[in-house]
Image (tube, rainbow, N blue to C red):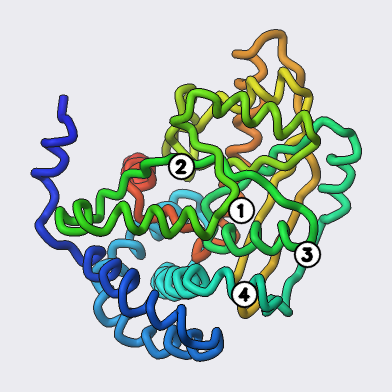
Amino acid sequence: MSGPRDDQMRRPWVSLKDFFWLVYLYPLRFLAAILPVPWLQRIGSMLLPPLHLITIRWKRLLTNRITAVYQAKSVKLEAGATARRFITNALFRAMDDLVMDKLIAEKRLRRVHLQGQDNLDRALSLGKGVIVLTGHFYANRLAKRYLAQIGYPMASVRNRKPQNRALGRFAKKLLETRYVEFLHGIIKDELFLQDEDCALQIFKRLRLNGLVNLHLDASFSQERVRYPFLNGERLFPAGFLRIVRLTGCCIVPMLCLGNSRELSVVFENPLDLEPGADQHEFVSVNLPKMARRLESQILRYPDQWELWDRPQTWLAIRCARLVL
């Protein structure tokens, strides 16, 4: 069984992502602090052509992964164009992160499409709190900051030490901590899975009729269940359903798309949960529905889902290839 030292030794000394993080955390972050938002957005647009040039191999890998899934699902898609938009969306999200506080403080989000607000209000009217269920879509952070500004603050349940296998030893040692601290400043209201009182903190938020955001495609959880996903299999967190069952709170799926130029936030209908005789049955009858809904969102907006290049997605796609 490999340990942290083995993982460190398998990493290259420097990777392409190390270079990205170095440029991002120093010159770009410095420019973001002193330049007006429109200027930085122009810099982001200027960076697109060289970014697409140096990520050719990455786009080819993404194209293969996306193609495998869509062929398995018998859905037509121009995977190469999707991979290109995926890279573009990654850059725009990163640039938005740099100026997030300015975007909110200066109220620069003028093209926002908010749909299904009545679905969220209806869930809140029950007074038991709401778990807002999402996948890892690029616009999530921006959308949550905007929602907090208009009166819907929500706590984000997160992994305190996310694993990033694309980093080299240089970034792992010198840049990772700085980047994680940078994200803390953007997300603001966080609850960490590693904290012993995380479940208690979620209970408290829900009892105050608050909002708690959970990613269904986050695999870091003490309770996980394997279900079919993208024509393969994926581990899904199941512990939050114990909290749902105990509190009677609502679950409202949210889909966030776009960036600061144009942002769409969609609150879908609250999930109609089946009671189940016990916790095991409650999970087995309800979690597959949530997984299918998330899969549907990804198939509709593949260029907006940021986990195509993660190891767990790759394992699912390898499974998909076996049945093609």
- Residue under label 2: 231
Q: What is the x, y in percent for residue 183? A: 45, 57
Precedes in sequence: disc 1 or disc 4: 4
Residues at circles 1 and 2 in contact by the CB criterion of under 8 Å: no
The local crowd at label 4, few if under 14, some if 14 to 19, many if 20 or more residues have their Cα within 10 Å, is some
Q: Tag 3: residue type? A: Leu
The circle drawn on residue 258 is none
Q: Tag 4: residue type? A: Leu
What is the secondary structure assignment of the residue under circle 3?
strand
Placement of 204 over or under 108, stated as above or below: above
The circle drawn on residue 114 is 3
Precedes in sequence: disc 3 or disc 1: 3
Placement of 186 over or under 282, stated as above or below: below
Is 244 in front, or is 191?
191
Q: What is the x, y in percent for residue 3? A: 17, 30
What is the secondary structure assignment of the residue under circle 4?
helix
Q: Is residue 8 left or right of residue 36?
A: left
